[in-house]
Image (cartoon, grey):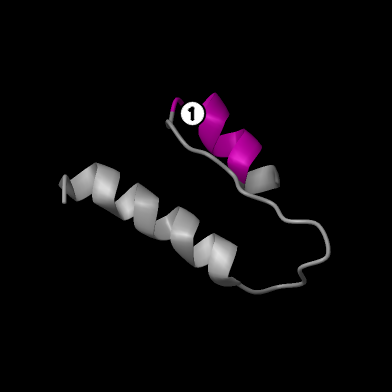
Amino acid sequence: MKAFERLKKLGFDIEVKLQDGLGHGIDENGLNYGLKFIKSIIKV
């Protein structure tokens, strides 16, 4: 969360997605979230 807070203070438009019970990793929900983000950036 330190990186998120620091980048926000520097003016970056960022989001953070946390999921309870998930250790250091990416599950299907995280993959779908990332795919949605990528599609919004490259307008697919």
Is 42 included in the stretch rendered in magenta?
Answer: no
Q: Is residue 29 above or below residue 9?
A: below
Name the one closer to the observer, 17 or 1: 17
What residue appears at the point 45 percent right and 25 percent down from the top-left corner? 11
What residue appears at the point 52 percent right and 37 percent down from the top-left corner? 7
What residue appears at the point 37 percent right and 48 percent down from the top-left corner? 37
Residue 18 lies, in percent from the top left, at 69, 52
The answer to which image quadrant residue 22 occupies is bottom right
Q: Is residue 29 above or below residue 18?
A: below
Q: Is residue 32 left or right of residue 43?
A: right
Report how many numbered discs are placed on residues in the image. 1
What residue appears at the point 83 percent right and 65 percent down from the top-left corner? 21
Q: Is residue 42 left or right of residue 3?
A: left
Residue 32 lies, in percent from the top left, at 46, 60
Is 10 included in the stretch rendered in magenta?
Answer: yes
Magenta span: predominant SS is: helix
Q: Is residue 31 left or right of residue 40?
A: right
Task: Name the residue beneath numbered marker 1.
Answer: 10
Residue type, mark 1 in image: Leu
The 10 Å Cα crowd at callout 1, few under 14, some 14 to 19, many 20 or more, is few
Mark 1 residue element: loop
Residue interval drawn in magenta: 4-11
Residue 24 lies, in percent from the top left, at 71, 73
The answer to which image quadrant residue 25 occupies is bottom right
